[in-house]
């Protein structure tokens, strides 16, 4: 197996891309990543691009062809991948697999989502319908907003089984909103909330589904954004003129997929997610104890708790308490979602998994914003999911 390194990371500010077209977004992602290291896109051998709503919201297919339109990228092995909200992570794995197969020494993984119109407005009902396509057909009946409804049920089950309260889970959102204020790329950079704010039903904060505990502040954002990673083997780093000591190694990576339907499987103990995370740790020859930086897929606060358990930083049912105790803070035992997470940094679906890995790379290089920088960052884990804890892409990173 060849060692794989992150040579460059680039992202847009998350939130609204206004009138930017899909071709413009993709080219901006590639050229932005190349500028980070002064490389020419012609030096990239392979590529992959991830998005989830390109057909339904952007009326655009064949994203690989758009990536090939970027100067220097034509005629190369490029593919588009879709794995719901894990599309970005899948794009990274796609590039890694190409490099491992010897199709090249350098490559770029791009992820994007354009969920708002040219005026920055969103059609909430349409987006709810479109995202619902990533659930099992028989489990959509009676659900106006499919995924919030499904995760409201997961939240209720988690609370009932482990004796966790809405107040406990609110600590996830409150910490992430606090982190986002120091992240210049975060969507909710200007918003601050307290635990009481997150619990109080007034203004924008309401129960999303009658009779279930999920509230507005428990939810991730509707977001435009893009992100890109340039990956390389050791030979590729030399080709790009990037010093190894300036890079982060993707030392472990794995993917697993559980059945799409939630019925007849234990969503609170996702087998595929746990297997993928364990395999990534095994490949990296590291354990959860070695990790003190992580980015996890908190599409809803309950996933902040469950994700903390999947990466091995808390025992079963103890994920929420990890946040309550302050362990997930940048100055805590393990800085989790110091970027602001999906809840406050934003969730541009296809870019999310790439942004998780990119942010962890910044942390390990000591390049995160000062207020968010984890001291002595030594290793990082990422956990990117698609669907109702269905597709899982996990990575473990360490300084090169």
Image: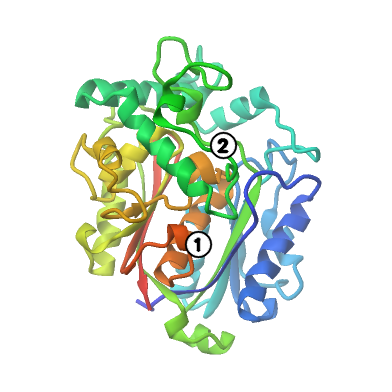
Q: Crowdedness of circle 2 by 10 Å Cα count: few (<14), some, many (20+)?
A: many
In this rendering, is residue 267 above or below 68? above
Q: Position of residue 322 (x, y in %)?
A: 25, 42
Look at 70% across and 44% down and name the residue there. Answer: 16
Q: Position of residue 68 (x, y in %)?
A: 72, 66
> From the viewer's perspective, is 199 left or right of 284?
right
Q: Which circle's residue, 2 or 1, is located before the other in the chain?
A: 2
Looking at the picture, tell me which residue is in the foreground, 277 or 245: 245
* Image quarter of the N terminus: bottom left
Q: Position of residue 331 (x, y in %)?
A: 33, 56
Looking at the picture, tell me which residue is in the foreground, 276 or 225: 225
Circle on res. 369:
1
Q: Crowdedness of circle 1 by 10 Å Cα count: few (<14), some, many (20+)?
A: some
The residue beneath circle 2 is 221
Circle on res. 19:
none
In this rendering, is residue 330 above or below 270? below
Looking at the picture, tell me which residue is in the foreground, 191 or 104: 191
In this rendering, is residue 376 above or below 335? below
Looking at the picture, tell me which residue is in the foreground, 206 or 159: 206
Q: Secondary structure at mark 2?
A: loop
> From the viewer's perspective, is 90 left or right of 274?
right
Q: Position of residue 24 (x, y in %)?
A: 77, 57
In this rendering, is residue 236 above or below 257? below
How far, Cα to Cα, is label 2 from label 1? 22 Å
Whether residue 84 is visible:
no
Type of colouring: rainbow
């Amino acid at each position: 197996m060849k060692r794989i390194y992150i040579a460059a990371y680039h992202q847009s500010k998350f939130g609204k891309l206004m009138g930017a077209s899909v071709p413009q977004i993709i080219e901006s992602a590639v050229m932005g990543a190349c500028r980070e290291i002064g490389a020419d896109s012609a030096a990239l051998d392979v590529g992959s691009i991830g998005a989830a709503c390109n057909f339904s919201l952007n009326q655009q297919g064949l994203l690989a062809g758009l990536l090939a339109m970027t100067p220097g990228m034509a005629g190369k092995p490029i593919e588009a991948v879709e794995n719901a909200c894990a599309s970005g992570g899948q794009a990274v794995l796609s590039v890694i697999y190409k490099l491992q197969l010897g199709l090249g020494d350098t490559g770029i993984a791009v992820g994007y989502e354009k969920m708002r119109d040219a005026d920055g407005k969103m059609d909430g009902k349409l987006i709810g319908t479109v995202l619902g396509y990533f659930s099992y057909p028989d489990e959509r009946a009676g659900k106006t907003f499919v995924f919030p409804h499904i995760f409201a049920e997961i939240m209720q089950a988690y609370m009932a089984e482990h004796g966790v309260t809405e107040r406990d889970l609110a600590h996830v959102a409150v910490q992430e909103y606090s982190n986002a204020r120091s992240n210049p790329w975060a969507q909710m950079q200007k918003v601050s909330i307290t635990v009481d704010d997150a619990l109080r039903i007034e203004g924008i904060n309401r129960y999303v589904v009658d009779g279930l505990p999920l509230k507005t502040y428990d939810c991730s954002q509707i977001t435009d954004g893009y992100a890109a990673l340039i990956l390389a083997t050791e030979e590729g780093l030399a080709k790009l003129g990037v010093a190894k000591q300036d890079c982060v190694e993707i030392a472990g990576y794995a993917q697993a997929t559980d059945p799409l339907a939630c019925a007849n499987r234990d969503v609170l103990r996702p087998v595929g997610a746990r297997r993928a995370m364990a395999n990534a740790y095994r490949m990296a020859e590291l354990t959860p104890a070695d990790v003190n930086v992580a980015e996890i897929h908190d599409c809803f606060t309950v996933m902040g708790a469950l994700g903390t358990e999947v990466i091995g930083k808390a025992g079963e049912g103890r994920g929420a308490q990890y946040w309550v105790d302050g362990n997930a803070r940048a100055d805590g035992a393990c800085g989790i979602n110091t970027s602001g997470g999906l809840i406050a940094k934003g969730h541009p679906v296809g870019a999310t998994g790439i942004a998780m890995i990119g942010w962890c790379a910044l942390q390990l290089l000591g390049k995160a914003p000062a207020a968010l920088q984890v001291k002595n960052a030594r290793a990082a884990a990422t956990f990117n999911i698609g669907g109702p804890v269905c597709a899982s892409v996990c990575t473990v990173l360490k300084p090169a």
